[in-house]
Amino acid sequence: MTISINAAFDSGNIVVESLAGTSARLSIRKDRESDFFQWFHFRVACAAGDALDLAITGLADSAYPDGWPGYAACASYDREHWFRLDTGYEAQTDGGTLTIRHTAEGPLLWIAYFAPYSMERHHDLIASAAECEGVAYRCLGTSLEGQPIDCLEMGEGPVQVWLYARQHPGESMAEWWMEGALDMLTDPADPHGRSLRRKCRFHIVPNMNPDGSRRGHLRTNHAGVNLNREWHAPSAERSPEVLCVRNAMDESGVDWAMDVHGDEAIPAVFLAGFEGIPSLKPEQQEKFLAFQAALAAATPDFQTELGYESSAPGQANLSMSTTQLAERHGAVSMTIEMPFKDNRDLPDPVQGWSPDRSKLLARACLETLDRML
């Protein structure tokens, strides 16, 4: 019998080019109104014992072709526990081909670029957190397709802290990070959570791009716009998601901010900052560097060797949230990046970088902030 492949569900993305027995030739659909593509998520219906041979082609033209060498696809039978598959990449075959091989252990197998964080799980997260004592819910606005931009607020302190994620919807590890952060901050018994709520007022946006998330996009919203290049001049027509969040930030002010992401190519967790902004203050940069050093001391999952090149003085890209907030509010703002691949320093051959490690990293970040304050 021939296997069947389907991606007609929340965050699904694959194009079936051909099927033959237990083999398939596939490709990835581009983001709507965009040339970005890299995220995939699909379901394979098969028989236990089938030797699956799945080739995803045309990847030399993907958004980040350097992300494929050394990468292993994620898979799950129950959509709860995700593990890595035998995966290889050949840049010269069929326009760049990722080949996934696996002997099926059951009739249905889900395969994704990273463990998905569905919009249904997002709504469960919002509902659960909003019921916790001391948590206030706000809808900051709506996306181009009318989905709410959810914000959870908590804490009585004067320090204004903004945590926001999934500007790039395919970076689903970012919302797993958010789940870990909310678990900690809403736990009445957690000592760091209690301390932080006393010191800070938190504003938490777990998903800034619900349209792209549901559509199975890598990087853009419904209009094909990269939200993290809109912060200098967001508009209701192109980027209402950024506009409503930035307006709320202007109302509250921003002292500390963390924008949560995933990086396709670099096999490590790292921070990016705001060193190139025109109004850079020495104490502002000192606080960022102190946080980075403290986080490296707090968890071996974080490091400072690998990362992005620093911007030259005065040359920061102010269309990005981290630099815009540092310039606009004098904030200590940062982008934290997690790997789609495994963590080079602490590899896990079964799961690679995973939802659980994303959640634990959130706790380490918040504990570090507590100590800094």
Image: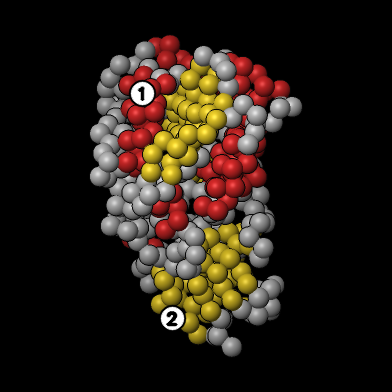
Q: Residue at x 45, y 56 (%)?
A: 214
Q: Which residue is at the front of the view, 1 or 67?
A: 1
Q: x, y (%) of residue 338?
A: 52, 42
**Nearer to us: label 2 or label 1:** 1
Query: Could you say whether the residue bearing mark 2 is in a helix, strand or loop?
Result: strand
Please identify the quarter of the rendering in which residue 236 is found.
Answer: top left
Query: Could you say whether the residue bearing mark 1 is in a helix, strand or loop?
Result: helix
Q: Residue at x 49, y 60 (%)?
A: 10
Q: x, y (%) of residue 222?
A: 33, 53
Identify which amino acid the numbered label 2 is placed on: Ser
Residue ID for mark 1? 250
Q: x, y (%) of residue 86?
A: 60, 65
- Please say if 103 is above or below 140: below
Identify which amino acid the numbered label 1 is placed on: Asp
Q: x, y (%) of residue 96?
A: 39, 65
- Is any part of residue 229 visible from this angle? no
> How dense is the environment of label 1, judged by Cα within 10 Å: few (below 14), some, or many (20 and up)?
few
Q: Are marks 2 and 1 in contact (CB under 8 Å)?
A: no
- Residue 79, label in figure: none
In which quadrant will I find the N terminus? bottom right
- Please say if 316 is above or below 82: above
For marks 2 and 1, the one nearer the N-term is: 2
Residue 50 left/right relative to 27: right
- Is any part of residue 236 visible from this angle? yes
- Please say if 261 is above or below 257: below
Residue ID for mark 2? 18
> How dense is the environment of label 2, judged by Cα within 10 Å: few (below 14), some, or many (20 and up)?
few
Q: Which residue is at the front of the view, 186 or 373?
A: 186
In which quadrant will I find the C terminus? top right
Q: CA distance from mark 2 to mark 1?
A: 51 Å
For the view shown, which residue lies furthest in the right direction?
189
Please identify the quarter of the rendering in which residue 275 is found.
Answer: top left
